[in-house]
Image (tube, rainbow, N blue to C red):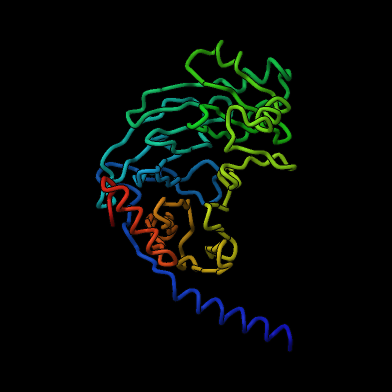
Amino acid sequence: MKRICIIIFEMMLFYSLFCEVKLTKLYEYKNESKGIYIRSVTNTHDDITGNDIFINEYGNIMLYQRDKKQIFFIDDKYQIKKIIDIKTNTHLHTFQTVGSNILIGNYTDAFYINNDGEELFRVKIYSILNEYNGTDGNWFNACYYDEKSDIIFFTAKHNKLHCILNPTLDEKQNKSNFYTSGETQKLLEDGLYAPHLTLNEYNYLFIDGIRYRWGATAYETKKYICTLNQEMKYIRLFDRKDSNLIYYTIPENEEVESITYHPNGDWYFLTINWSTNVHTLWRIENTWDPEFREQWYNNHPEALKP
């Protein structure tokens, strides 16, 4: 009986909080639209095939297509306005917006490009690690570029965090600016180069007190933690200040491909319907802090307001 009461209470909580969520379907992308493939291979179990959605600090939306190694820039009508090709022979697994630029990584290199695809730096991480560790499994797992301190961080074997100061296109200089995991930890502890960055006892990287998730299915900001549960098919938003939970169930027959945070507090996610092979862009509007949302647009008049 006690268990039944708990379940009923949780259901009541779910539906009461669900009503607070304003969900909007923004746009549907066919698998091939006007000669543009959003997804070229439709395989639900393919680890490589997929799309990632990203929003930079100015509120601009981008889609990264893993099959074709292309970045699509989205306009105010949520249509594709520009495409750039990423020139690499290996599959990419890291994608991060930094200001108006983009950091991309495969399992060997990390490179930083502008919106025209021009490389600003490239770091041959695999090659650098080989010189220090030998050639046994030196593919890096993930990377993060901190523009404020001009340091690129990356996790490698045993998820140890390494870094390179002031990365450039010069391979020799990148090697000389390489810091091992122990040196990286000391660098962050000293706070000389990046006082806003810290490591905890589990070697997790924190940025201004917020854990960096390295592309996981949990996304954190100073105010919220957004968790995607693929198996249970829901998105959970946790308010750090009020400890409130807001849930949204993923629409039936839809599978979430990617989710990202808008600096105004909104959350965007991209789904695919495998029956129709249609991709849908959705927005969960920030109704839990509307004053912050409005103020963000007031401070960013150049941003596109939906």
Q: Residue at x 58, y 27 (%)?
A: 193
Q: Is residue 174 left or right of residue 52?
A: right
Q: Is residue 232 left or right of residue 42?
A: right
Residue farthest bottom in this picture? 1
The C terminus - image quarter: bottom left
Q: Quadrant of residue 268?
A: bottom left
Q: Is residue 43 left or right of residue 107?
A: left
- Residue 133 image position (x, y, % from top left): 73, 20
Residue farthest top in this picture? 172
Q: Residue at x 66, y 22 (%)?
A: 179
Is 170 placed above or below 259 here? above
Is 165 placed above or below 36 here? above
Q: Quadrant of residue 130?
A: top right
- Could you say which is closer to the camera, residue 167 or residue 1? 167
The N terminus - image quarter: bottom right
- Residue 11 image position (x, y, % from top left): 58, 80
- Could you say which is closer to the camera, residue 190 or residue 207? 190
